Amino acid sequence: MAKVLIIGAGGVGNVVTHKCAQVPEIFSDIYLASRTLEKCNRIASHIRRPIETAQVDADDVPQLIALIKKLNPHLLINVALPYQDLHMMEACLETGTDYLDTANYEPPHEARFCYQWQWDYHERFKEKGLMALLGSGFDPGVTNVFTAWAAQQHLDEIRELDIIDCNAGDHGKPFATNFNPEINIREVMAKGRYYEHGKWIETNPLSTSKSFTFPENVDEHRIYLMYHEELESLVKHFPNIQRAQFWMTFSDRYLKHLKVLENVGLTRIDAVDYKGRKIVPLQFLKALLPDPASLGALTKGRTCIGCLIKGLKGDQEKQVYIYNICDHETCYQEVQSQAVSYMTGVPAMIGAMLMLTGKWRGKGVFNMEQFDPRPFMEKLNEHGLPWKERIFHASQSEVGADRRFDSPKNHDPKSGS
Ligand code: NDP
């Protein structure tokens, strides 16, 4: 029985609150706070259990501390924006509260994300006997756990890792993002970056792509090389990895709009002068774009996110593909959300559950792959994100066009491991 404080009442906040409410034996008291109280109240009104709501500006550490002291939660779940990560970690240290988030810290004025800012908190959390779990969403999050699972169950050594994220859904809008538009556009427009033989290699944004055929009729899509934060922690914790890459699908329509917005300067993150006022064009654009939380009722189709992992078992090369397929409309029926928020909110709840039940415990700051993946993999199946895995021979190993997942062994998690 634990009290949990969720901060952030957007698309992901809605899902975490619903999912925590589904497990009253662990989450006995749920508080939801955000910058706009009305958004918290709207989410609470759709949930049968009582959810206490509050207004808070998470950029203001004293305000956070006062709220935490008043509510006295065991754990703070941060599903606001990456800009607030360090403020919330400070407030947790001050109040003796465990911490969990789904995205690593980004400074507002620089489109750059990196774990070091949060890893630097390790000693302070450790000294206080507190735990911070970083990146408990899908990617990062489940993708880290899939990698740890492959390392634990299938391979002696991971050599190559490809994380491949496909959203084959359609919301029918000319241009919208599936999570916070500001964070999404900053991420997509950043330089690509991948790891090879101990070095990071940069590529121009979205300049490297190939075709990939996804399983279960999710079909063939173009995948684009990007930098994603879990690469940084995974190559640290699995030092045998020789190459690690992250890929994502985008529709031509999305890319065309993004290019035009970039060309006219609307994706800039530096402040410009407008009639004597300073405005940040990307923040202004965010105000014009659809709220991701509003896309739930409109989005149809499926996502498929997984890890294609190549390595050695004994002296044999072996390849494992572990993935989840999620249907937008099914998510909407359950929690009034599209799949991208659902796929972030469910792992946040599971990470919280494992921390609160002591199954994942440690003093300091941790990434997901540092813990035993088994309880997490089990809970994914129970709470709406079932996964599958397929094992390949080395001869079938290239990621690229015409790749089909006809594997010699198709493991269905429901039939046990
Ligand atoms: P939204 O923009 O929908 O929601 C963010 C919420 O945080 C809003 O309710 C917003 O309030 C609130 N907020 C912003 N600033 C503050 C502040 N200073 N104080 C208090 N509340 C604040 O974003 P999403 O729900 O789509 O995303 C939430 C997080 O999840 C992001 O960090 C995102 O990067 C992460 N994410 C992680 C993924 C993963 O797989 N790991 C995938 C997708 C998202 P207001 O409405 O008033 O602006």
Image (cartoon, rainbow, N blue to C red):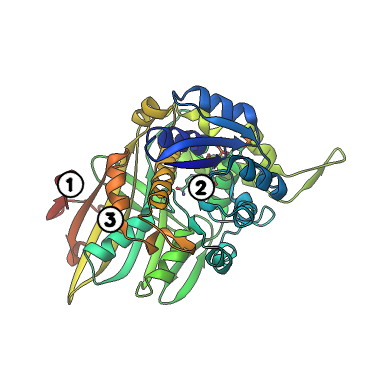
The amino acid type of the residue labelled 3 equals Arg
The amino acid type of the residue labelled 2 equals His
Q: Nearer the viewer, mark 1 or mark 3?
A: 3
Q: Nearer the viewer, mark 3 or mark 2?
A: 2
The amino acid type of the residue labelled 1 equals Asp
Dot 1: element? loop
Q: Which mark is residue 285?
A: none
Badges 1 and 3: C-beta atoms under 8 Å apart? no
Seen in the image, is 415 located left or right of residue 115? Answer: left
User: In the image, residue 403 lies at what x, y percent?
Assistant: 25, 54
Seen in the image, is 407 located left or right of residue 17? Answer: left
Q: Residue drawn 47% across and 54% down?
A: 135
Residue highlighted by disc 1: 412
Q: Point out the quarter of the image occupied by ligand 1.
A: top right
User: Would residue 181 be visible to someone looking at this image?
Assistant: yes
User: In the image, residue 308 lies at what x, y percent?
Assistant: 30, 58
Classify residue 281 by image quadrant: top right
Q: Residue drawn 43% across and 27% down?
A: 336
User: In the image, residue 265 lies at what x, y percent?
Assistant: 69, 46
Q: Nearer the viewer, mark 2 or mark 1?
A: 2
Nearer the observer, 4 or 385: 4
Question: Considering only order in the chain, which callout, 3 or 1, is on the residue closer to the N terminus?
Answer: 3
Q: Which mark is residue 374?
A: 3
Question: Considering only order in the chain, which callout, 2 or 3, is on the residue closer to the N terminus?
Answer: 2
User: In the image, residue 108 lies at what x, y percent?
Assistant: 67, 52
Dot 2: element? loop
Residue highlighted by disc 2: 74
Residue furthest to the right? 276
Determine if the C-beta at disc 2 is less than 8 A from ligand 1.
no
Seen in the image, is 235 located left or right of residue 403? Answer: right
